Image (spheres, rainbow, N blue to C red):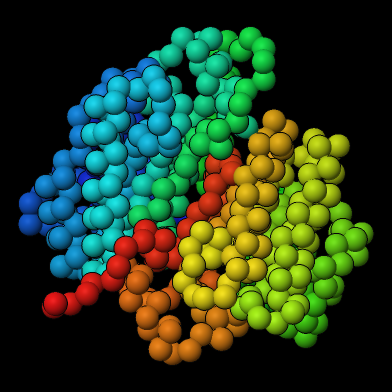
Amino acid sequence: MTTEFSGALAPRGSTAVVLGDSPGCATVLGTLIAVGVEVEEEARGTAPDICVAVLTGSSVLGSRSRGGLPRQRLAAIADRMAERGTGRMVLVTDAGGGVHTGADPSEAADRAADLAWWRHLAARSASRGVVANQIRVGLAPFLSHELEPVRTGSVLQHLPLRRVARPGDLACALVQLISTGCAYTVGETLPLDGGLTLNLIPPLREPKPWTPPREPEAALADRFSLAGRTALVIGASSGIGAESAAELARRGADVVLVARREPELRAVAERIGGRPVVADVRDTEAILDSVDGIDLLVYAAGVFGLDGAAETRARSMEVNFRAYAEICDALVDRWRESGTRGSIVGVCSVGAEVVPVQRMESYGASKAAMVQYTRCLAVSAGRDGIRANCVAPGIVDTPMSEWVAPAFRDAWTARIPLGSVGTPPDVASFVAFLASDAASHVTGSLVHVDGGFTLGGLPPLGEQ
């Protein structure tokens, strides 16, 4: 397939099957056909390239429960894909995302079991070439979520972005997860819910009854495009930052690149056609004074250090958190004043949640601070149409990972269901997706690009 940017579509000529009887199946089918995927009836003995299961019907959102996952059929499809060595599987659901006191406990328990089964299927299938992920949709009238207008308005008060999910939101999320750029994300949940799981407490006033939007949705390709946008990429001289800058440029953005290593930065700028700004990330005033007209921020700067050296804690907090927060604060203020619907993507680490090595207290705390700051910012800025998300890479082939000893690298890889380390383009695909309007209903999220590492659990232990 040829396209102006990588990772936005599945290869044309791919085949797919769609399982389920939810109203969401119509959106899934239309999306697959629109991107050149041939949808066919399930045939035993053959393996489609893509399998999408749609399991919706949350009673708390005013929809009728539609049974459970067809586990045997899905497992058989995954096995046939594994025999071939490739395949993509996506589960679309409105289940999960917290314990809703108005939900039926038995229905919730059944759905939780289905979601756990799916994640185990994803972990088991990854090493055999099958990549499985899930989309969790929030309030979506097109999925037969039929709440009264006032009750819909009550739900929207809990959402920073304050709108319902639309068919185009699901279409974009599906395209991302079946794309060639989504090769290192396993068992991940993409929250298509406007920030519902951030648990925003609504203002103490009567909710406004919801009315359906009148404006048409943008075309699929237009939502992935960044033409006419200006992106600031910090930490752009190598690794994930450089590849993210390149991907944004491929999608049409004008890119301003910031890093302190001048030769490397200028080489990236020349390669992608960006404007270099040589600066230390800790000098936030100098960076902000040198740029204007920015409406996208990608913060990919970071330092890793093990505790023991006196400067490790201060440097970790300075680069991984303080500079990021100060730049975000300043940009959000500008965007509010100008009415810009900006987007922020912070590149953090699985170290924000898990502890793969000893003596990473300062690094882990700085990355966790980055994630929680981003969630809080998503709530504070959401009413202004500003989104903020994070991407959490696992072990990725970058200069920062050169400290990893071969034996440790092998031990880490053994804990990754996909069985390999990641590459900068794997991360850049999700950075560009979250920055674009394709993710316009995603905010406050943490998307893992780690081969399934944060699914947890032990590696295969062999014979006992």
Q: Position of residue 104 (x, y in %)?
A: 30, 22
- Position of 147 relative to 350 (above/below): above
Q: Quadrant of residue 303?
A: bottom right
- Residue at the image point whose x is 13% and y is 78% from the top: 463
Q: Is residue 59 visible?
A: yes
- Residue at the image point whose x is 56% and y is 23% from the top: 156
Q: Position of residue 394 (x, y in %)?
A: 48, 68
Q: Is residue 254 visible?
A: no
The residue most toward the left is 45
Q: Is residue 423 left or right of residue 315?
A: left
- Residue at the image point whose x is 14% and y is 77% from the top: 464
Q: Is residue 279 left or right of residue 245?
A: right
Q: Quadrant of the N terminus?
A: bottom left
- Position of 108 relative to 423 (above/below): above
Q: Position of residue 366 (x, y in %)?
A: 66, 62
Q: Quadrant of residue 306?
A: bottom right
The residue most toward the bottom is 406
Q: Is residue 276 left or right of residue 58?
A: right
- Residue at the image point whose x is 43% and y is 83% from the top: 409
Q: Is residue 386 left or right of residue 402?
A: right
